[in-house]
Structures are given as structure tokens and as C-alpha cells.
Image (cartoon, rainbow, N blue to C red):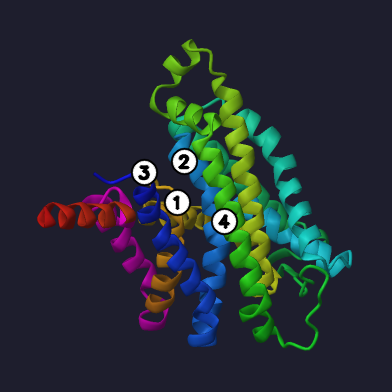
Amino acid sequence: MISAVDRKMTRYVPLALLALALAALPAVAQPYYITLVLPAFAYGIALLGFNLLFGYAGLLSFGHALFVAIGAYCAAVLSSKLGVRSFEAILIVSGLAAVVVAIPVGMLAVRYVRIFFGILTLAFGMLFHSFLFKFYDLTGGDTGIRVLRPTLLGTAFSDLDKTSFLIGPFYYYCMGLLILLGLTMWRIVQSPFGLHLAAIRENPRKAEYLGVRVRLFRLVAFVISAFYCAIGGAILAINTGQADPELAYWTHSGELVFMTVLGGFANFFGPLVGAFAFIFLKSELMSTTQYWRFFLGVTLALIVILFPRGLMGLAERVRSTWAGRRT
């Protein structure tokens, strides 16, 4: 018999080894590949929030790039126009701005479910994209706004060039942020709140009969997901040095859905796996062929048809098959 301690060790040891591997990556990998990990960190954080809404609450949003763009533009406005260089302040303001926007949007959107919810969130996302594109004096129009290098915990690292800053201090800062927010999200989904969301996803009417305030719980999940997406958006903007309207475009929201499905929305770690897989797959396809979008679409179709639980579902199937053969 396997004890509870052994089961926990089996679960946590691979995660610890993965964290150590990511920490050692800047010392062994080329700078190009390290710069690919940074957007994977950003999308990993954003998808943790997105999957709280999609995987746990059962609401598929087609407009969550709206909140990624809010985080990016907050970083741009604060750093380049208001002179705020503290990354901690940028993260807090970005998250709070997303929450402020998410509350009225969510109050309207969570009144609906299924495709109606998705289309409504898509409409808000495209509305914000139009605002960013048209109001040139405020948002820079199609050119966007430049994002300046922030300070990390009060340190400017002025002796480092941009690449050294990104693959050094900023890399480890974002990695720590991903771990911290990942642990926070793990506590959320394992809490009574997370269990209520799962109950709402499975049968909202029965949950409501049992006294669960369905719309309120959906709204809270929507707001938390917006906060996480804004944090990811701020990291993306600092990594690229630019915030532009395409961050709010519907295709970007589609990429969030793509990554979540690719990794497996039924597993807590699925979106994280999907983020890393998508970034590296996209990079390789873009360097190989101009038809990379076609091959990404084929990949998603194959995943949905052959492995509906995503890459994590495939890994679990392989592990269970291997365990069955050993016994």
C-alpha cells in the first residue's frame, strides 16, 4: 500500500525538479530560448486565471485578451508617461485596473452561459480593441505605447543591457511570480470556493437549489481570472517593450483558448504545459514555414479529436498504461 506521504512525494518531486530545471536554464541554454520562456511564464500566469473560469467554472470566454491588454497598457502608461518604474507598483495597478473593468463586464456577462457568454465577452474585447486603435492621442493607435524597463524590488540593474536584464533578474522574478501565483491558485481551486465552482460547472441549477449563489461565484471567478490575465499582460509588455492593440484582438483571445485546450483544461497544470508547448511550437513553426497558422490549427484539431484531455491527459494515459504493464 502507498501511504499518503508517498503519494505527496510522488506528486511534488517532479514539480520541484522542474522548478530546479527552469532555474538552471539561463546557465545552460542560449539567450534566444530563455527569451521564449519569459512569454511562457506570462501566459502561464494568465492561463491560471483563465482556466479558473473555463476549466473550473465552465465558462468559456472569447474576450479575455481584453484583460491581458489592460495589464500591458497599464505597464506602458505607468512606465513611459507617469514615470513609475517600480515593477511591484505596475503589477498592483495593472491587477486592480483589470478588476475595476472586470466587475461591470462580469456582472453583465455571467447572466449568460455557453455561447452567449462567449460572444458577449468577445464583444467587450473587440470594443476595447477599437478604443485602443482609434484613440491615437491616448493609446498611440496602431503603434501602441513603449514600455520602459522597470526596477525589481527597488533595484534598477542599470549595469545590464536589455537582454541581460531579461534573461537574468527579470527571468527569475517572473519565475518566482509564477510559482507564487500558482500556489495561490492551487489554494483557491482546492478551497470550498473552488469546490462550489466545480458544482456550478456540473449542474448550476442543482447548486442553486442547495443555496449556492451561482452568479456571485461566477462573478468572483471572472474577476480573479481578469486579475491574473492583467499580471501576465504586464509581463508580456515588459518583455517586448511595447503595448499594442493586437493584444486585445480576438485572435489573441483565441490563442488563450488554444493554449488551455492544448495543455488540457481538466488538469490544474494543463494550461501551464499548454503555454510552454504553444510558445515553443509556434517559434519552431514560424522559423520553418510561412503557413505556421495552418499547422497550429491542424495540431489543435488533432489534439481535440485524438486527445480531448490535452497533453496532460495524454501524459496521464501513458502513465496509467505503464503502471498497468508493471503490475
State the residue position of label 1.
257
Asked whether the beta carbons under mark 4 and mark 3 sit within 8 Å of each other, the answer is: no
Question: Which structural element holds mark 2?
Answer: helix
User: Bounds of the magenta span?
Assistant: 286-311
Residue 295 x/y as whole percent: 32, 68
The residue depicted at 36 percent of the width and 74 percent of the height is 291
Per the image, label 1 sits on a secondary structure element best described as helix
Membership of 301 in magenta stretch: yes
Q: Nearer the viewer, residue 76 or 160?
A: 160
Residue 196 — which label?
Answer: none
SS label for mark 4: helix
Give the Cα separation between the discs numbered 1 and 4. Answer: 14 Å
Question: Mark 2 Cα within 10 Å, few/some/many (few <14, many 20+)?
Answer: many
Q: Are marks 1 and 4 in contact (CB under 8 Å)?
A: no
Task: Confirm whether residue 273 shows in the render.
Answer: no
Point out residue 28 in the picture as x, y percentages from the top left corner.
48, 86
Circles 3, 2 touching at the beta carbon (< 8 Å) = no
Identify the residue shown where x is 52% and y is 59%. Answer: 44
Q: Decide which of tag 4 and tag 3 comes sooner along the chain.
A: 3
The dot on residue 4 is: 3
Say whether residue 118 is magenta. Answer: no
Residue visible at 62% across and 41% down in the picture: 224
Nearer the N terminus, badge 4 or badge 2? 4
Residue 177's x, y, as percent? Answer: 63, 60
User: Please, what is the three-letter code of the amino acid marked with disc 3?
Assistant: Ala
Q: Is residue 228 left or right of residue 9?
A: right
The residue singled out by tag 4 in the image is 45
Earlier in the chain: of badge 1 and badge 3, it is 3
Residue at 61%, 55% (x, y): give it.
180
The image's mark for residue 54 is 2
